[in-house]
Image (cartoon, helix red, strand yellow):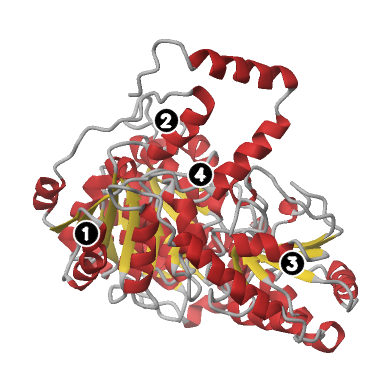
Amino acid sequence: MEFPLITRRLALQAMAASTLPAFLPARGEARITHRGWVAGSFSGARALVETLIAEGTTTVFGIPGAQENELWDEFKQKGLDYTLVTHEFSAACMADGFARATGRPGVLAIVPGPGITNSMTGLGEARLDSIPIVCIVGDVARGKKYRPFQVHALENSAILKTVCKEVIDVESVGDIPYSVRLAFQLAQSGEPGPVAVVVPYDQFIERHLFRSAPLAPPTVTFDQSAAETALSLLSRGNCRVGIYAGLGCMDESGPLTRLAEILNAPVATSVSGKGAIAADHPLSVGWGYGPQGSVTAERIFAAVDIVLAIGVRFSEVSTGFYSFPYKRMIHVDACAANLGAVYKPEVAVHAEAGAFLDYLLKNEDKIARPRANGLEQRIEWMRGQEEVCFRREYCRGGIDPMDVILAMREATDPDAMVYVDVTASEHWAAEAWKAPAPRTYFNPTDNQAMGWSIPAAIGGQVAFPERQVCTITGDGCFLMTAMEITTAARERLPVKFFILDDGAYHYMQALQKAAYKRTTATILAGLNYEALAEGFGVEYLKIENEGELESGIREALKTPGPVLVQVCVEYGKRPLRWLDAAKKRYMNEMTLEQKLRFGTRLGARSVALRNRND
């Protein structure tokens, strides 16, 4: 096995060899005898579970199989909690939802072959959204036990490399504890992401004398020279600063908020960064910074001279197809490859968000600005105007999805966690949902994996059984992972599944109608949600009109156990700021020939046949 940190491994093994005797159990005794150590003579499966526990794992998501039955039996033997899922896509999403809620790596355990391929969409979401996950894979036999044509004998490690930050192949049973420890460290360090540990199944039953110490903490990234340049630029009192905060700031809410107050700077977040600053803080302007995001953010940021972007990457989704109408930027990120990847900053600072914020706060006297220029009053007024727009009527029949979002926002607890799926409503929710604190609002952003919210919310509820957990899920997304609601029923997890039902892939309809004057393959089959809820073993509630909305939501929230809530919605003509902004950007990049072709086709289709929507 080739380890990414092989020199550290050798150093740790040398240290273990000199210090272990004091901690080793008597011959034949297998137990951890020193805090954080995995030491004793036992099987590879036992060693893996002991290491998971030593690394702080509280639960594992997945489905057992022939290659991992020994491992799952050890989960039970050692009392490590596990959650059986209905599909490995859901296992990855649950681990993702758990990680977003806690800030700690979510863990899943799957078999090779279909277990891996089923999980890839969820792992890909975590990879593109920078979410720490540790994926344990029981692989086919290798080495002396290898035989051709084993079941599930795909190129499993190679497949995982397409969706994981790192893949660690375990070559011998003695490497298992170190490999798992390394996976946890890699998943969380720099830009977080999923890391897979691939263990041939025969190593689970092989016995070994283990002596594994905890890894030394990783070095905190901090480019001192670039940070000093950024400080010098921010020290210019006539330079109006706007802070754009991403997921990298999620655990730095206090320092981020304090910096904003010192700089008298408005703070906008990416979608993934919602909650990094409390939505009701006087300097919070919502998400985005331009026409793709909140109106308040766009208007307030129009007056800034320089954007201080911390822990954010400027992805296609967060920028509305790469919009950035500012000439000057300081970009801070823990991943060097992200700096300047989309926009060239005036100053690029390779640093952890926390370390950079602490550095600026220590130099408060150099960057402090007065707060008496009316900025907070302008923000408050604009946020009020946004609320007026949110409550404007756009529907004539069914329930406006925006009204669902607003009613849920008012009815849920302050520490409730809401998991939003890939629907047209995700953009309205990004604007209107007021995240009061970090790790309360979650959205699959850059892989846009439909169906993510149902299993992800279950993962969040496993992490925090006593907190309110809700989904905002479209009926199309529901079809992807609906069976996972049976997991919530079996485990008595009180997630409230709000399904926005309009009988169509509305998001795709919005895209298709604008480009083609018709829709294709967007109408869904009608479902009997009440019968489904009965079959799933959960409570059912139907909200059919605006008059039932507020009371229906409150009834669902107070009902014990999981609840499937069917909300009959009508999308009407409420504008989608993100979609309008992205479409404009996309059109601007088309060639004249492409624009003419689209225009000609749209003109012809205004009178052509085959315009039936389906």
**How far apart in space, not on screen, are marks 3 and 2 (Cα)?**
39 Å
**How far apart in space, not on screen, are marks 4 and 2 (Cα)?**
24 Å
Kindly state the secondary structure of the residue where label 3 is placed: loop
Foreground residue among 594 and 209: 594
Q: Amino acid at mark 4?
A: Asn
Specify few, some or many for label 4: CA neighbours under 10 Å numbering under 14, 14-19, or 20 or more. some
Disc 1 target residue: 488
Specify few, some or many for label 1: CA neighbours under 10 Å numbering under 14, 14-19, or 20 or more. many
Quick one: quadrant of the C terminus? top left
Foreground residue among 391 and 598: 391
Q: Specify the quadrant of the image occupied by residue 40.
A: bottom left
Kindly state the secondary structure of the residue where label 2 is placed: loop
Disc 2 target residue: 154
Q: Nearer the viewer, mark 2 or mark 1?
A: 1
Q: Please give the label number shown on residue 434.
A: none
**How far apart in space, not on screen, are marks 2 and 1 (Cα)?**
32 Å
Q: Is residue 612 above or below residue 248?
A: above
Q: Amino acid at mark 3?
A: Ala
Q: Amino acid at mark 1?
A: Ala
Q: Nearer the viewer, mark 4 or mark 2?
A: 4
Q: Earlier in the sequence, mark 2 or mark 1?
A: 2
Q: Earlier in the sequence, mark 1 or mark 4?
A: 4
Residue in view at x 26 percent, y 58 percent: 546
Disc 4 target residue: 447
Residue 355, percent across and down?
Answer: 71, 75
Q: Is residue 180 visible?
A: no
Residue 101, percent across and down?
Answer: 43, 67
Disc 3 target residue: 351
